[in-house]
Amino acid sequence: MHTPLAEPRRSIYFDYQVYPAHTASVNAAQVERRPVVIVGAGPIGLTTALDLARYGIPSIVLEAERQVSEGSRAIVFTRRSLEILQQVGVAEQVTAAGLGWRFGNSFYRNQRVFRMEAPHDADDRFPPMTNLQQPCLEQFLVDACQANPLIELRWGNKVTALVQAGDYATLDIDTPVGDYRLEANWVIAADGARSAIRGLLGLQLEGAAYEGRFVIADIKIELDLPTERLAYFDPNWNPGNTVLMHREPGNIWRIDYQLPRDETPEQALSADSLRERINAQLAIVGVQNPQWELDWCSVYSARALTLPKYIHDRVIFTGDAAHLLPIFGVRGANTGFQDCHDLGWKLALTIKGVAGPGLLASYSAERVGAAREIIAEAGKSTRFMTPPTPGHCLVRDAVLSLSLTQEFVRPLYHWRTSRPHDYVDSALNCKGDDNGLYTSGPHQGAPLLNIRLGDDQFLFDCLGASFYLLYFTDANEVPGDIQAQVQALREQGVPLQVLAVTGNRQGAISGADGVIDDHSGHLRSKYGARAGSAYLVRPDQHVCARWQQLGGQALRAAIVTALGNE
């Protein structure tokens, strides 16, 4: 019988709430069948549920525990992640509670040898990075899910078996008072790095696991330091190894330090070891006789692994259940948000019968491709942070030594921060548009640029759970052939909205669902557009077609392709 922790976890900065376990289904007269069951109520599972609800798709979220996750865990969320969280309604809470930042500093033997500056300008609504502890984010997502009538959260429910048969899957679920069975047309495995669903299906991740292990320690202490990433290579108290520091809300500091190869996690997490090493690192940043309180600590190792495919009959993997990525470059949760945002609209349109045969399959193709690209790129950072062989260590140490005096080697410290993936090779991209003729603007497969439209409005504020046609015009009406195709597609169930971008008139434009006032020409310039140009945007804000002059038949062909009919 499953017995999750029933006492609130201890924390200095976060008040844990223990939720009642769902037991009403035990001894039910008949087995329920639901459209979607999501396993795992971490950030990715909860965001997936909220994303599906935007399309009217109900879901059940199963969580083995009865409270949100323990410890800071994922703490750095990128601008793209905030754009995704805006779509599900929690970005404002995250930015209000979090700490935005854009600079990173690398030190070698206590001398700063590199300073990273993430791009940020007036068109950026969100900071490049925002620091917030994972349980705080999860609480925002839990509150949003509980307020949504299409989402049912079942706490204290652990999946113990899964069998697939035809067009559904059957799950056996254990609770504190007994077990029950639940059927689902689709199961989404969002149950993290130790995915029970992955184990039940006998699936293996592919890739590399690195030897380097790190202690994570969250401490409460007041430090007069800015919110910037701090990386220390070969500090005097940890020779040959690496230490990272991040400021978190609530005067919490995250210190990650690399362990010697022969040290066990038990040794590393002993009170004496933690005290000695944390005090040594605080001394490096100028704190003598520090007074601090430990909130949470753990040990992790860097891994670069992925499933070779994310869809297995009626089971779909996302987030850490699908891949394990090195934290260097804040790739874990941020990649997971892109996973679930790619999946949400494709699964929703598949359930509604609007999708072509290739739409859902493109989720696996796009996101496995993204994971493999990230693994290749992150591997460079990981091998620099934790050299896996004596040869790698020799090269790393040579770079470190040269960086004290030679400017040209210092960019090698760049940690290749997580960025939005471009689906340039997606099967959903239009084959016959004018993408190659543009000299500026977001290309096929790239996410839209979230351009500032006014003092308090940005482009993404105009977007929702739909395809969007951004149509640039100086006329008072969208051309009739485009209107006719939009109407025909809507009658087939395709969610499609037309936003007219105009600079010379106010008020409604016939045939458009909304008007964007671009009297300054800023949006047109950024998108390389002119009157008659258009961008077709997927529901996850990625461009799938763009034209310098659009006609109705071209629009229909692009939508047919974007729905997976090629």
Image (cartoon, rainbow, N blue to C red):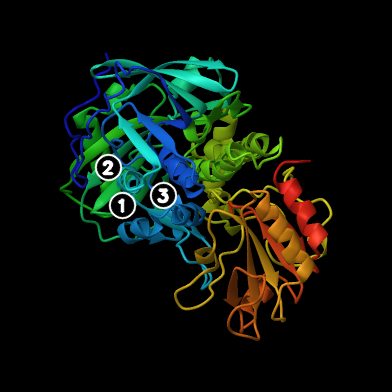
Residue ID at (28%, 22%): 266
Q: Secondary structure at mark 1?
A: strand
Q: Is residue 384 left or right of residue 26?
A: right
Q: Amino acid at mark 3?
A: Val
Q: Give the alpha-carbon distance from disc 3 to disc 2, as whole Å.
A: 14 Å
Q: Nearer the viewer, mark 3 or mark 2?
A: 3
Q: Position of residue 501 (x, y in %)?
A: 64, 74
For residue 76, the mark is: 3
Circles 3, 2 touching at the beta carbon (< 8 Å): no
In terms of depth relative to the viewer, which is nearer, 85 or 511? 511
Residue 486 visible within the image: yes
Q: Is residue 543 above or below residue 34?
A: below
Quarter of image, res 30: top left
Q: Amino acid at mark 2?
A: Asp
User: What is the quadrant of the N terminus in the image?
Assistant: top left
Q: Is residue 511 left or right of residue 131?
A: right
Circles 3, 1 touching at the beta carbon (< 8 Å): no
The answer to which of marks 2 and 1 sits earlier in the sequence is 2
In terms of depth relative to the viewer, which is nearer, 86 or 393? 86
Q: Secondary structure at mark 2?
A: strand
For residue 68, the mark is: none
Circles 2, 1 touching at the beta carbon (< 8 Å): yes
Q: Position of residue 521 (x, y in %)?
A: 65, 81
Residue ID at (39%, 60%): 100
Residue under label 2, please give it: 218
User: What is the quadrant of the C terminus in the image?
Assistant: top right
Q: Amino acid at mark 1?
A: Glu
Q: Give the alpha-carbon distance from disc 2 to disc 1, as whole Å.
A: 9 Å
The answer to which of marks 3 and 1 sits earlier in the sequence is 3
Residue ID at (24%, 19%): 176
Residue 443 visible within the image: no
Residue under label 1, please give it: 248
